[in-house]
Image (cartoon, rainbow, N blue to C red):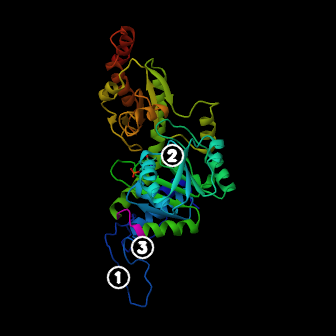
Amino acid sequence: MTAFNTQLVHGQTINDNQTGAVNVPIYNSSTYQYQSIKQPVHWDYARSGNPTREFLEKQIAQLEKGVRGFAFASGMAAIHAVLAIFKPGDHLIVGDQIYGGTYRLLNQYFKERQLTFTAVDSRDLTAVAAAIRPNTKAIYFEPFTNPLLQVTSVKKIAQLAHAHHLLTIVDNTFLTPYLQQPLCLGADLVVHSATKYLSGHSDVIAGLVVAKTTELAEKIYFIQNALGGVLSPQDANLVRRGIQTLALRMDRQQANTAQLINFLQQQPEVTKIHYPVIPGTSDYEIAAAECHGCGGVFSFELAPEIDACRFVDHLKLFKLAVSLGAVESLAELPYEMSHAELPPAERLAAGISPQLIRLAVGIEDATDLKADLQQALAAVQPQKQPQIQRQTQKILIK
Ligand SMILES: *Cc1c(COP(=O)(O)O)cnc(C)c1O
């Protein structure tokens, strides 16, 4: 068995062509010829299976240590496929900070189809246990929440779930199998928006599912083939290629993140940083025990006198955009952008204030990223504080 970085590069080699090509070809055929009516075929029609897509599906199954992977046309299509294995009358427990699109899917689509759910703080095991009903079938959550990076123990949730014969479903988009392998911690199904770290270049929308057992894999395959939200061979190739450099990118993203946090901690305008690196906190202890790193997304709060909208508008290198996990650095204001759909009171209750900035750190030079934050901070200094202004200018000149 090869080690993780080798697996990233090579996947499970299939050598299915005569050319010696080191990469799996992009198979553009929607249909496949039968040798004869009597001979069984492995491939017949590309919704049911495509060799380029299958390479990626085997690649993610290997990396997540599951039995089988599935590639979908988006993260939401992947999540839909997982939720579609449940039946009317089933109940799910979901983390109360899950991705907004997932919440919308549950609340505005599956609820109408009699799938009920209870949203709870997945860090609070007592609350999770209290939400279990006779018809509860699964616990669905994100181990690192967005944008506050609150950490839930996959191990603890999976233990609780198993004790009650529930499935544990983890959205591993923020960490990827490089930093956490939820199936090894007891989860049953993993989902990904491969749009983010796995593809890594903001050039594809894709989703993946990995199942721990063949029984679950059969259920997911039925949905994938029956509903048909499959990833195209071209996009499967982009995700495959992105995965090859996942570890290199993530190492740089994490190193840059550490430098930016270090810099922001010293800025008087920054009142709080959300990233689970403070020893002694439960977030830190869980991350230290269950993850190989905390990724390249973090958020911070600006002092009330600083205009956060003007701050993000002044950023030049950080692009003002939602999404995360790509080579380029992005900044966003969750209150105005990713979480704007929530009513103001709910946003505030969830800890998403108008002063909160989320950064998705890329692989650029940390010095340039720091300089960008610094010039934007300098540009939004309130007039009354000439002292801070002078200091900032001095640093900029060096
Ligand atoms: C982006 C995202 C999704 C949705 O994935 P798409 O590829 O945009 O459909 C789901 N979960 C998380 C955590 C995400 O960040």
Marks 2 and 3, the one that precedes in the sequence:
3
**Secondary structure found at label 1:** loop
**Secondary structure found at label 3:** loop
The dot on residue 33 is 1
Front one among 69 and 154: 154
Whether the residues at callouts 2 and 1 have beta carbons within 8 Å, the answer is no
Front one among 274 and 126: 126
Q: Please name the residue shown 36% across and 57% down the image.
A: 238
C-alpha gap between disc 2 and disc 1: 41 Å
The 10 Å Cα crowd at callout 3, few under 14, some 14 to 19, many 20 or more, is few
Amino acid at dot 3: Asp
C-alpha gap between disc 2 and disc 3: 32 Å
Position of residue 358 relative to residue 115, above or below, is above
Taking the magenta stretch, the answer to whether it contains residue 279 is: no
On-image quarter of the C terminus: top left
Magenta range:
226-232
As drawn, the residue found furthest toward the right would be 163
Residue for badge 2: 175
Tag count: 3
Residue for badge 3: 16
Q: Which mark lies nearer to you, 2 or 3?
A: 2
Taking the magenta stretch, the answer to whether it contains residue 229 is: yes
Q: Please name the residue shown 37% across and 23% down the image.
A: 374
The 10 Å Cα crowd at callout 1, few under 14, some 14 to 19, many 20 or more, is few
On-image quarter of the N terminus: bottom right
Most prominent secondary structure in the magenta stretch? loop
Marks 2 and 1, the one that precedes in the sequence:
1
Q: Is residue 11 visible?
A: no
Is residue 287 rendered to the left or right of residue 341?
right
The dot on residue 366 is none
